[in-house]
Image (cartoon, rainbow, N blue to C red):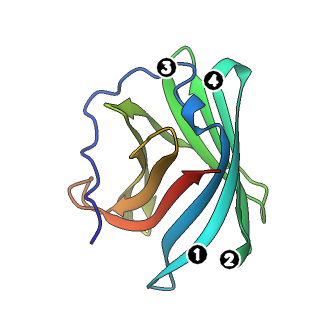
Amino acid sequence: RFDPMPPLPTMRTPGAPGDFDWLTGEWRIHNRSIVNGEWLEYPGEATVHGILGGVCSVEELRIPARNFYGMGLRLLDVGNRVWSDHWVNARSGVITTPGQLGSFENGVGIFVTEETVDGVAMKYVGVWDNITARSCRWRQASSRDSGETWDQNWIMEWSRV
């Protein structure tokens, strides 16, 4: 039903200023996500700004159908050449730390974080792919087996306005 998640890189490609410049602009988004164990579909929209000479990308996400609003904040650690992808939910105003770390591998942005949930080591991935001048896709998934298998829980199909 869904495209498989790409393999995680064994060595990260160095990030560079401007890697997220393609995302700048106005977008309409078709969302599919798991809510209370069921896949739901609903519309959304986003406005994205590239700032600080391409080392920061700020996304305002609006999903009125689910009363869901927030901000994606992508920052390049220039010295280490690694991107971090953070989320701020408008309800809390709190930035997620650490962000998902990653870079673009052969045109696919792969951003990973690990944490322990109820004693279980979990790996989370956000993937930007199918990137064109007019569209892209973002997917989110989790893994309980170090990335051998993935459970996708949110898929966003972006179309430029």
Element under disc 4: loop
Comes first in the chain, label 2 or label 3: 2
CB within 8 Å, label 1 to label 2: yes
Task: Report which residue position mark 4 lands on.
Answer: 55
Q: Which residue is drawn at 56% across and 41% down?
A: 85
Task: Report which residue position mark 3 lands on.
Answer: 81
Q: How crowded is mark 3: few (under 14 residues within 10 Å), some or many (20 or more)?
A: some
* Closest to the observer, 150 or 121: 150
Regarding residue 108, the answer to whether it shows in the image is: yes
Q: How crowded is mark 4: few (under 14 residues within 10 Å), some or many (20 or more)?
A: many
> In the picture provided, is 123 more to the left or to the right than 133?
left
Task: Report which residue position mark 2 lands on.
Answer: 66
* Closest to the observer, 132 or 58: 132
Q: Which residue is drawn at 68% across and 53% down?
A: 46
Residue type for callout 4? Val
Residue type for callout 3? Arg
Q: Residues within 10 Å of mark 1 (few under 14, many from 20)?
A: some
Element under disc 3: loop
Position of residue 18 relative to residue 116, above or below, is: above
Q: How crowded is mark 2: few (under 14 residues within 10 Å), some or many (20 or more)?
A: few
Mark 1–mark 2 distance (CA, rounded to whole Å):
8 Å
Task: Report which residue position mark 1 lands on.
Answer: 42
Position of residue 93 relative to residue 113, above or below, is: below
Location of residue 150 in the rendering, given as x and y in whole percent from the top left corner: 29, 62
Q: Which residue is drawn at 73% across and 63% down?
A: 69
CB within 8 Å, label 2 to label 3: no
> In the picture provided, is 73 more to the left or to the right than 108?
right
Mark 2–mark 3 distance (CA, rounded to whole Å):
36 Å
* Comparing labels 4 and 3, the label whose residue is closer to the camera: 4
